[in-house]
Amino acid sequence: MTDEDGQNDKKGTRNAMTDASIPLQFVARGLDDARRAEAEAALRELAARRIAPLLAAAGWTHEPLRAVVTDEGKGAAPIEVRLHLHLPRRNVAEARATGRDLGSVVEQAVEHLRRRAQRALERLRGQESWRRRARRERLHALKARVAALPPEIAREAEAGLAGLDLSRLERIARRELAFMRAMGELEPAYPTLTDVIDETLAETRAAWTPGLKPEEVERALLRTLFKVLDREAENGRVFVDALSLQARPARDAEDQAEDMVQEEFHEFHQPDEDLSLADILPDPSAMSAEDAQIEAADAALERGGLVAAILRDLPALWRRALVLREIEGFDEPDLAHILDIPRQTAAAHVVHARAFVVARLTRAGLAGGDEIDLARLLAGGAAEERP
């Protein structure tokens, strides 16, 4: 066997390995046989070196690489190379390159495809890092918008936000994060409270309206807060079919909700499993004040956990309207502005949510009328009728 024959055998073996690792579906338009063979060989060789290792590492080798090379000829238009590759979890990577030199255009297209395929596969292996990167990009874009504001508006926005008490904003954000995580709309550890507050402040500053009063600034912040949370929930739904290949599986949302209200603890907790004579004989003395206080605290904790579980089952807008109205004290015009809905709709949401909560509490024996003090219930207080 000559050296040339050996090289040809090696070349044929390499092509066979390439075909096995990443099949190629090649279409050429306007190319003669020689240039067609040149383009196909370049695609196979580059795909084997740059793309096949990525797919092999992900265990994804059966989908073909689809390539279309077009040359109109006579200098009418540059050569165009289009590449299309299906990836795991119904992702698709595409690349396009144009130019006058066939080899350079093919190499450029393959490199673009490699970067996009690598990004998609890394996204599957660690979605949280990509979401954090996307958040940083949004924050950078918001900072650019703030920098483009007129100086007087930028100074007013900075002063208006700096002098505002953010404790209520943080309290509402923390509560809403807990409910959305319990419903499985958000991951247990992402986004954090700091992430949400930072993005809310940045968006409000970038969209600042001159002449706002402090209470109007607070309403604008709350309105932006709910939009940020809804966007995070929507972004999370995009990844339902794209679970991370390396991340630990998330805990069941129902288990998280039960932990939040301590359902399992209260169902199975036995403070004294050893039966004694004192357990079956009546106590001749009256219950001490300390015992009564402990019993009242336990009952209040149970009621608060029940109300939290009931609110978890409400539609998001109903829950937000009821909590903002009953706990935070916002009136209907404020609710309409914060939730970005008509005033009549906001009032209807409060009525429907209240009726739902009262019905569930009545069934549990904790409410005897239509008027309940929801704020005190959530804080662990007694359910009382308002005067």
Image (cartoon, rainbow, N blue to C red):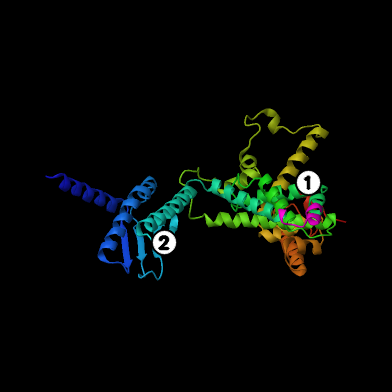
Residue placed most toward the observer, 84 or 246: 84
The tag on residue 351 is none
Q: Which one is in front in this view, the residue at disc 1 or the one at disc 2? A: 2
Q: Quadrant of the C terminus?
A: bottom right
Mark 1 to mark 2: distance in Å? 58 Å
Going by the image, does 132 lie left or right of 219?
Answer: left
Q: Main secondary structure of the magenta part?
A: helix
Residue placed most toward the observer, 96 or 55: 96
The secondary structure type at the circle numbered 2 is strand
* Whole-percent x, y for residue 62 in the image: 33, 54
Tell me the kind of residue under disc 2.
Gly
Q: Quadrant of residue 205?
A: bottom right
* Whole-percent x, y for residue 359 in the image: 71, 59
Mark closer to the chain start, 1 or 2: 2
The secondary structure type at the circle numbered 1 is helix
| Pointers 1 and 2 in contact (C-beta within 8 Å) | no
Reply above or below: 349 against 246.
below
Tell me the kind of residue under disc 1.
Ser
Residue located 37% across and 59% down the image: 101
The tag on residue 167 is 1
Residue located 47% across and 47% down the image: 122
Q: Quadrant of residue 70?
A: bottom left
Residue placed most toward the observer, 353 or 371: 353
Highlighted range, magenta: 147-155
Going by the image, does 38 lie left or right of 155?
Answer: left
Q: Residues within 10 Å of mark 1 (few under 14, many from 20)?
A: few
Residue bearing mark 2? 99
Name, please, the residue furthest toward the left. Answer: 1
